[in-house]
Amino acid sequence: MIVKLAIIASHPVQYNAPLFALLSKDVHLKVFYTWSQKEEDNYDADFKANIEWDIPLLEGYEFSFIENKAPRPGGHHFHGIICPSLIREIQNWEATHLLIFGWNYHAHLSAMRYFKNKVPVWFRGDSTLVDEKPGIKTFLRRRFLKWVYRHIDKALYVGSNNKAYFIKHGLKEEQLIFAPHAIDNHRFSDDYDPNYNTKAIEWRKKLGIKKTDKVIHFCGKFEDKKNPILLLNAFLDIIKQPDFSHLKLLLTGSGHLEDQLRSIAGKNPAVIFQPFQNQSVMPIIYRLGDIFCLPSQGPGETWGLVVNEAMAAGRPVVVSDKVGCAIDLVNKDTGKIFRSDSKRSLIESILYIITKLNSPSHYLSIDIKRHIELWSFDNIKKSILNNFDA
């Protein structure tokens, strides 16, 4: 049988496009994008800007944009993506397998229900139980999700927390395929551009960072979920100590907390802000720091792909226990996990890594990169290809 894999996704994403192109080298696939591509759809409310990624998102694979007939189009609510022609177009393409990214849109759930028992229906999502609280809402939601997942044959789980989530919602071990959450590791490697480190050194100079400075780096949206204010307050406490006057905090990004962050930082020269940066320079951006920190308090930090990116650049990480990837990516060789929303725990974790950075046997870039190599597009591809006949 010739495999024809139809993929349903809402819109082109910088983390998925390289995977689709890689898969297309071994299997006939087509991606059906369900969210209309009007200019205003690129607006990111958290970054407060229209985001146009500067790496190709539509190259190397077949795709089509399905007309979205939703009265209020958008990716933030269930009825924001309604595509009456989606099922017909997948049928006309004669798909033998269906892979759906996310069920929580009308068009996606409708396709999932229609194609169940007609072709193998696979699902990919990264939800976890990390933020779950007991109560009637959780009870009712679990019953509903068990019904949703009865309409799939296989689930591609991205890590340990995601696997636990699927099992809790009724899926069996034999229905689960490990397809690790990944970024384009190669694009972040020195093999891709041997000048990354040189460019980072020059960039650090422009930011006023000395060779002897150690930089703690946050990169992302300045939003409550990611809790950058906790990191800033912890950093300001750390540098009150005379032994840590060589530390700098670099905050890369934008969002609704920016004014508050700048107010807390005041004119402290140890705190450096720089705006949102596009994808092509991200491998350099992560090399500006010596430690990467993601202090999220949730809810909804289901994975944290910025951690993958920082590790692919060889940086040790400090992440909270509310970050979905922590249990899989962070170990004694790659970083520290701290208690979410605990400034004391965060300070202890940062100081521990700072004191170990100059050791020849701790947090070596080569060990960090070796660990993140397991979380790769190649391994996702292998998992998918190996399960077409399963």
Image (tube, helix red, strand yellow):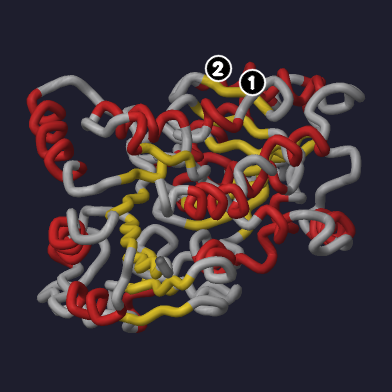
Identity, as a three-letter code, of the amino acid under mark 2: Ser
Label 2: few (<14), some (14–19) or many (≥20) C-alpha neighbours in 10 Å:
some
Q: What residue is rendered at 55% in x and 30% in y? A: 328
307 relative to 70, above or below? above
Residue 172: tell me if it is visible.
Answer: yes
Horizontal and vertical percent position of residue 311: 68, 42
Label 1: few (<14), some (14–19) or many (≥20) C-alpha neighbours in 10 Å:
some
Is label 1 in contact with label 2 (beta carbons under 8 Å)? yes
Q: Which mark is residue 349?
A: 1
Answer with the quarter of the image where residue 191 lies: bottom right
Residue 108 vs residue 244, the one in the foreground: 108
Horizontal and vertical percent position of residue 245: 79, 30
Q: Is residue 268 left or right of residue 127?
A: right
Horizontal and vertical percent position of residue 300: 35, 40
Q: What residue is rendered at 73% in x and 25% in y? A: 333
Q: Is residue 272 left or right of residue 213?
A: left
Residue 38 vs residue 291, the one in the foreground: 38
Residue 140 vs residue 93, the one in the foreground: 93
Residue 245 vs residue 216, the one in the foreground: 216
Horizontal and vertical percent position of residue 243: 81, 21
The residue identified by callout 2 is 345
Q: Is residue 39 left or right of residue 286?
A: left
Identity, as a three-letter code, of the amino acid under mark 1: Ser
Answer with the quarter of the image where residue 173 lies: top left
Answer with the quarter of the image where residue 367 lies: top right
Q: What residue is rendered at 70% in x and 35% in y? A: 371
Residue, far front: 1
Identify the element where label 2 is drawn. Answer: helix
Quadrant in which the N terminus appears:
bottom left
Residue 49: tell me if it is visible.
Answer: no
Cα–Cα span, label 1 and label 2: 6 Å
Q: What residue is rendered at 18% in x and 20% in y? A: 134
